[in-house]
Amino acid sequence: MHHHAADDPAPATSGAHDPSARTGLWLVGARGSVATTATLGLAALAEGHAPPTGCVTAQPAFAGVPFPAFRDLVIGGHDVSTCSMAKRAEALADAGMIPPRLLAATHPALEAADAEVRPGYDPREHHGSQQEAAERLAADVVAFRERHSLARVVVVDLASTEPPVEPLPEHDDVDALRAALADPDRAVLPPSSVTAYAAVLAGAPYAAFTPSVGMAIPALTRLAVEAGVPVAGQDGKTGQTWLRTVLAPAFAARGLRVLSWAGTNLLGGGDGATLADPDAVRSKLATKSRGLRDLTGSDVTPLHIDNVPDLGDVKVAWDHVHVEGFLGSRITLQTTWSAYDSMLAAPLVLDLARLLALAHAAGVAGPVPELGFFFKDPWASDVHDAAAQADQLQAWAARVAGEVASRVGP
Amino acid sequence: MHHHAADDPAPATSGAHDPSARTGLWLVGARGSVATTATLGLAALAEGHAPPTGCVTAQPAFAGVPFPAFRDLVIGGHDVSTCSMAKRAEALADAGMIPPRLLAATHPALEAADAEVRPGYDPREHHGSQQEAAERLAADVVAFRERHSLARVVVVDLASTEPPVEPLPEHDDVDALRAALADPDRAVLPPSSVTAYAAVLAGAPYAAFTPSVGMAIPALTRLAVEAGVPVAGQDGKTGQTWLRTVLAPAFAARGLRVLSWAGTNLLGGGDGATLADPDAVRSKLATKSRGLRDLTGSDVTPLHIDNVPDLGDVKVAWDHVHVEGFLGSRITLQTTWSAYDSMLAAPLVLDLARLLALAHAAGVAGPVPELGFFFKDPWASDVHDAAAQADQLQAWAARVAGEVASRVGP
Amino acid sequence: MHHHAADDPAPATSGAHDPSARTGLWLVGARGSVATTATLGLAALAEGHAPPTGCVTAQPAFAGVPFPAFRDLVIGGHDVSTCSMAKRAEALADAGMIPPRLLAATHPALEAADAEVRPGYDPREHHGSQQEAAERLAADVVAFRERHSLARVVVVDLASTEPPVEPLPEHDDVDALRAALADPDRAVLPPSSVTAYAAVLAGAPYAAFTPSVGMAIPALTRLAVEAGVPVAGQDGKTGQTWLRTVLAPAFAARGLRVLSWAGTNLLGGGDGATLADPDAVRSKLATKSRGLRDLTGSDVTPLHIDNVPDLGDVKVAWDHVHVEGFLGSRITLQTTWSAYDSMLAAPLVLDLARLLALAHAAGVAGPVPELGFFFKDPWASDVHDAAAQADQLQAWAARVAGEVASRVGP
Amino acid sequence: MHHHAADDPAPATSGAHDPSARTGLWLVGARGSVATTATLGLAALAEGHAPPTGCVTAQPAFAGVPFPAFRDLVIGGHDVSTCSMAKRAEALADAGMIPPRLLAATHPALEAADAEVRPGYDPREHHGSQQEAAERLAADVVAFRERHSLARVVVVDLASTEPPVEPLPEHDDVDALRAALADPDRAVLPPSSVTAYAAVLAGAPYAAFTPSVGMAIPALTRLAVEAGVPVAGQDGKTGQTWLRTVLAPAFAARGLRVLSWAGTNLLGGGDGATLADPDAVRSKLATKSRGLRDLTGSDVTPLHIDNVPDLGDVKVAWDHVHVEGFLGSRITLQTTWSAYDSMLAAPLVLDLARLLALAHAAGVAGPVPELGFFFKDPWASDVHDAAAQADQLQAWAARVAGEVASRVGP
């Protein structure tokens, strides 16, 4: 974590250092299930239609931390789809995921947010250099900030998972990267990284909720540090992986030895279809397994993701854990987890907006390891233990809140 | 936790303050499954036949803490049964729980330990006052300590679960209790408490691994403090309950709300038969549910224990957790846990012997809240969160190790 | 099964022997979840809003059997509740069980059915003899039949489970029973049996979908035979028990020996609350275990039903089956079943209406063993094997269809 | 099923038509886990050390059928391994699969059987034509029959799973096949089919317990019919697949619609290692899914097999079944199956020996569809429903027993 003090690129509005000022949340993939659920849910929370269940930052441990209030978050975003958030929400309600009364109550908010959605970056349609593409995206974010007089805008990438990326020399060298981006005949970054670069250009804090590479390119990370924007990633830790990082350290604390941890995921919805692509699923499986191997030392962690369209947005995950106990005795634990995946992810997206707003106000720049709690493959951290991450997060929030208080002054 | 400094009742042997000196482990219920497994396992560990998998104190987090070595633990105990430990071990091997090669390798150690078993307290056979009974039991412990030149003897109660006890005025008043104990016509303590009182009389650290009331009688606890003995309880947290105290805090950290937590236990073996008694099972169910209600705030925690003799010593536990997520969405988690219960408990018994030896050497007296990690219903602590308990335990061991080092000094 | 030929008490309408004529379905407990779901579902089927998934009689194996069509079933019933079917349906829709579009589409049908509901028998409010009570109930059924010009009315008892009943001498003796029923100071029958007696008085085929004793009183069964009404029971085999009677015979066919079969049921809704009453649950547990013991020969079948209100109408059942394999080897099977209980039961209620209409048209009187497929504790049959019951049912339907065809003639 | 009457190729011993005469069981892959378990188990049964749990033909439904007695079965076989059956059995006992007392009691029988094992066909070591290879294998079988004066020898293929085979024109044409087999430069058959051809040459009934192609080559099947040998296959239906063919028809009988059936298999042991080969696993997955798709009509049946070496010979299978109920309501069933795979397979191998001996004595030739009960992908049958297969099997055995009785005559 770098502290950026000298020349803050945040706009010099009155709210610049006030983390609780009106704040933008710019969703990349704004018309997808997670973004729509986050938008609808934010409206429900802000208007008192639902309690903030599932929001980490709304828990007592964070009382007194000067986050922006839910009612002070304003939503916009990018998407390549033209199906509106309201339409998407209707489909989710038909599938039983969203209660009809909330759908009705939040319709105006969805319409308002959808009006703030701009066309996303589609490499097949873009002509010109990637630099131009990023600048256009950044301009959308800056215009949103100015249009709504926001202290800052947090960008969260929720777009579909991309295949893994081949490393290029330009990824490690800021100057070479800049040169390549300016060349209209080259495309050295995948779309998720163009998005991340645009956030840097806009001076916007950024979180990578997908396994796509995004900001996780060394030269981009350096640019984020230079620009003074806090960044966090990667791949939201919502269900099965979260459960694994709760359980694995507990076995270790008991001195029990995990021999194998086999898992299966069944999911339908758009995510199931995306991950039915064997290239995309490789990105996902890689981030999903990393923490577990780290925590258990076992290499036997077979994992499958199956597209089961009839399940809709429900995700069912089964894990079989084989553990060696005292005198070599056999212990087995099986877990079956069932949940609407978007309902797990959405509140964490709101949390990240609030936490990165706080970080930005405090002048934090670059990867924030203490936000590792939210991610399968945390940047700048090798802590995967969910309980340890929760402790780190709470301690960090308390400390940063203190710094902000002393900075804003009496 | 009280620190007892002035007049230490431990025998003034050279090892008095050296926690790593030869130490006795006195098992009440010495011929039961858990005690036999602990004895056999200790021999296997001490002689290098098995690694200390499942022993908390053998993990890297405790490196450098001056516990007695496994080879410096000497076992004796009380039991009302006359079936020898070697016979019990054979039965466990026949049932597939103990590998044949370990049975053979540890036979001499089992025979040696069994020679140190003395008749337990059986209220139906005892004539005379409970004071006399306790003194006889204490004399057995003291004679064992002297016979083997042990620095100290740790008593661990592993006897069968007793029904809950009706409170009496004598339980709250040391003088009244003493008077009642001396009266041959009264029996104001259940057997587990006579055992606990005997440990106090013998100046022996004591742990209650069962849900039976044992030392958890206010007047007895005060006597333990006065006698300078550290005590810990109660009811070993080995499988399903441990798992629950791992998972419940993790839901809370995510802001997810547990609505109900329903569970079923299937077990055979001696424990299954004991808990088929509806009176005994009440003690067990009470300690099992306490932590969960505390951690989740939910009152809907139905729990059953079924005697399924054909399962033998394997215990199978199923839990169904219903959780409210974002916008009231439904999350369910089911866990199925399967393990040999005695194999889970036995290494923790060895851990408690080592930890209480350390506590005693450091002059700790009375209930040790930092040992709550090991118990379903921890004494002097309201922390049930397994990760938090692990942190407390490690910090405590490091601190006490430091105190001992400065006390033994150069 | 008795064939009743001589003096048929069915009304001499033109549809008397035409099983496919317009038929009444009189639901006792008409405003409960199952009855409301059956009514709503029947409307959805009749009007083409849903396919007949879950209806046994709509499967290809029954093609050509002259059941009444779904659109020819007319619903009425008794209930002690005054909360209308439409209100009940709304509550079920709010809980996510019924899709909003079906709720809207079936509203008129629910209103129409609810207009045919008459006050049920409440022993606390009834003054006079049980004979009078039964006659009033029977008159409601007859009036319904005449009002709608129905060929016959099938009564299905869906009311809340009653506690087990103490046998009385009057239960075995038709004359003694009649005398006792006429005595205003006696109440020798539980409400479910008064209901069953009323069906006999009305000449109506009758099914007991609950574990309440109902018609299963020898003297009442004799009266049913005499009256020429076919009857079937008891306790609908919808979920966990059905699954058990599928699996247990399969183990037997493989020569595998079931050692124990332990189960847990979690359910909320009204059924959960009813079964939280320890008396009522005894009736349920008795019928649930009977078949399993019969099929496996094992006595170790612990079973629990827990009221978990937050689950609403979803029922979750976990079973753990321990099986002995070749050379005494251990096999385990665990099943977790999750479903809306009313959605399982409702189509079977429609099936029973159609099947009993067929039986009545064919002159079948008394208990119909071939309907055992539908029941946990089948009357007049000791076949519990679900596959064998399905074979019996299909063969019976084909045979009876043939008899009806030859009777109606060209 | 063809009846072969004219010129029976079975040796003209006195036992030719007596199915209960001494019978050989020739195991291909004789030193593998399943074959060793079958051999050890047969000895245990024959000598009264264990009851015939798991043997279908020992159940009451088959009382009176003149099978060879267990004590009249004599074992021999082929294998490419040189690790003896006794050694293999020791390894299985160390892993906890075989009780120590049975290991000791059956040691002589294992030694005797192992002495009857001859080198299997290894294409990498064989020089000469495949015809020569098959003749050498057949000669081993014939010599075994004569050495022990056996009425017949049943060959059961238990060798490791082979990859799927590319069809060749020779596979459909007996003459072309014979010509190719005689050509030392060609290898038109995979090893499993050379084995099957050898059985035909030896006049031996044959069963394919593996998914390898074996006899399932049209020209070979015709040769079996011509030679008058009954054959049965393919791929033993032991655990998860068996369970699926029990459950799927039960859903259909209820009119419930299976939407998806997702499964995972975890297994270690030699089978796990073999199936870690992506080519071999294709054969297995193909046979495993066929029946399910047939029974449910659903195409969504993702299935995985993972090699989890630490599980040893235990196989754990998890299935998630998503079912559409009444009015489109959601039903889910999850099953977790855990068993020693070899313990499931071994008794079925003994059953097949007895059933094929009966078929041969009765003059049955070619594929026997009524033995489909034992196979994932039954030859000459499209019945997958386990209950229907059990009915067929019992009816067939009774009928063939009658034919044999009338043939042997008074």
Image (cartoon, coloured by chain):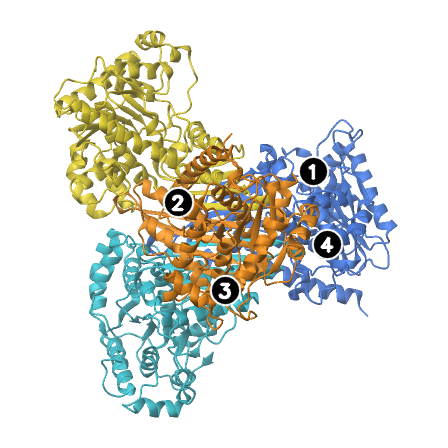
Chain colours: A cyan, B blue, C yellow, D orange
Residue at the spot of label 3: D131
Percent position of residue C140, x then y: 20, 20
Disc 1/disc 4 C-alpha distance (Å): 52 Å
Could you say which is closer to the camera, residue C140 or residue B290?
Answer: C140
Q: CA distance from mark 2 to mark 4?
A: 42 Å
Chain ID for label 1?
A: B
Instruction: Say which amino acid is labelled 1.
Output: Asp
Q: Quadrant of the N terminus of chain B?
A: bottom right
Q: Are discs 4 and 3 less than 8 Å apart at CB? A: no
Q: Chain of mark 2?
A: D
Q: Visible in this render: residue C242?
A: yes
Q: Where's residue C44, x and y in %?
A: 19, 41
In the rendered view, tell whether residue A231 sits above or below residue D123.
below
Q: Are marks 1 and 4 in contact (CB under 8 Å)?
A: no
**Closer to the eye: label 1 or 3:** 3
The three-letter code of the residue at mark 4 reads Arg
Q: Nearer the viewer, mark 4 or mark 3?
A: 3
Estimate how packed mark 1 is, as few (under 14), some (14 to 19) or many (20 or more) residues with alpha carbons within 10 Å: some
Residue B5 in which image quadrant? bottom right
Of the two numbered discs 3 and 2 in the rendering, the one whose residue sits closer to the viewer: 3
Element class at badge 3: helix
Q: Which residue is mark 4?
A: B101
Q: Using the rendered image, report if marks 1 and 4 lie on a common chain.
A: yes
Query: Which residue is the site of mark 2?
Result: D247
